[in-house]
Amino acid sequence: MKKITFILIVCSIFFVTNAQQLDAYRIYTANGEEITYGAMKNNLMAKDVVLFGELHDNPIAHWLQLELAASMFETKGKSLTLGAEMFEADNQLIINEYFWDYINQNRFEAEARLWPNYKTDYKPIIEFAKENGINFIATNIPRRYAAMVSGGGFEALEKLTDEAKSYIAPLPIEYDPELSVYKAMVTMMGMPAKGHVDNQNLPKAQAIKDATMAWNISKNLSENGTFLHFHGTYHSDNYEGIVWYLKRYRPKVNVGTIATVLQDNIEQLDEENHGKADYIIVVPHRMTRTY
């Protein structure tokens, strides 16, 4: 009897302790089935392109980006290519010069127009790529050109020089204003635009970013390699944005997508997050932020 009582006490302690454990994240498939990081990684290894959508201030997403890059490098070696929204195409030379040790770290960080959270969130990935000889591609349109589209539509880009256009997806780009990602931007504005900005041009500015990132990914695919790309999750959620353009530049490309979302309860995938990506990383709402 004493032995049975002891076992019951131990089991109770185990279950209470287990119930109180806090998970920093969970991963689900598009249909809401929980999956391990290892299974997700193995499934993505066969993809030509992996689009990792982040929440820019989320430490869990940034940590998993670095871990996934390291995991894929173990298998892919230098056939792995990395790239990111946070680096603009006209800064590719600066990145290359830093990777080739032509310029030092201080000079690179002073001249590359880095995001304010670079040191906490993106520097670890850049340094990992540099240390391991992995190609890193600056995929985004220079922000000054995206601002031109925001103010004057796609037509504003036509006056640019050929050199300037080399940093942008080929013009004219396809554009579908009915895609949910672009329709939502107009709806969210909720009021007439101020000054010279036209609300209808705001999603076009988003589209030119998506198209340019997709174009730069498509140009840098290697045979039997994988391109792992980092960007805000809204650029690939629901298989739109970058995915939509990438399928136009490379119709047969094999793409895997990851989305990052916040939920109050991470023990199951909220209905509204079903189908956002092949894999959805769910992080608690109360998770601390990097800025």
Image (cartoon, rainbow, N blue to C red):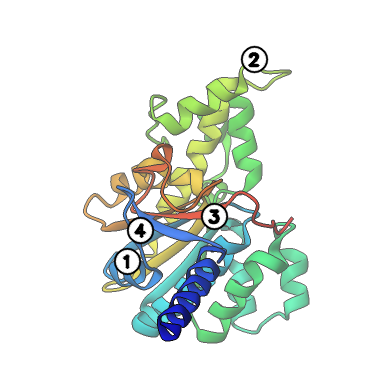
Q: Quick one: label 1 or label 2, which is nearer the N terminus?
A: 1
What residue type is disc 4 on? Glu
User: Residue at 50% of width from left, 59% of height from top?
Assistant: 230
Near mark 4 (Cα within 10 A), the count class, few <14, some 14-19 or many ≥20, is some
User: Residue at label 4?
Assistant: 34
- Alpha carbon distance from label 3 to label 1: 20 Å
- Alpha carbon distance from label 3 to label 2: 32 Å
In front: label 3 or label 1? 3
What residue type is disc 3 on? Val
The tag on residue 191 is 2
User: Residue at label 1?
Assistant: 44
What residue type is disc 1 on? Leu
Near mark 1 (Cα within 10 A), the count class, few <14, some 14-19 or many ≥20, is many
What residue type is disc 2 on? Met
Q: Quadrant of the N terminus?
A: bottom left
Q: Quick one: label 4 or label 1, which is nearer the N terminus?
A: 4
- Alpha carbon distance from label 4 to label 2: 40 Å
Whether label 4 touches label 2, CB < 8 Å = no
User: Percent x, y for residue 131?
Assistant: 57, 85
In front: label 3 or label 2? 3
User: Residue at 43% of width from left, 80% of height from top?
Assistant: 7
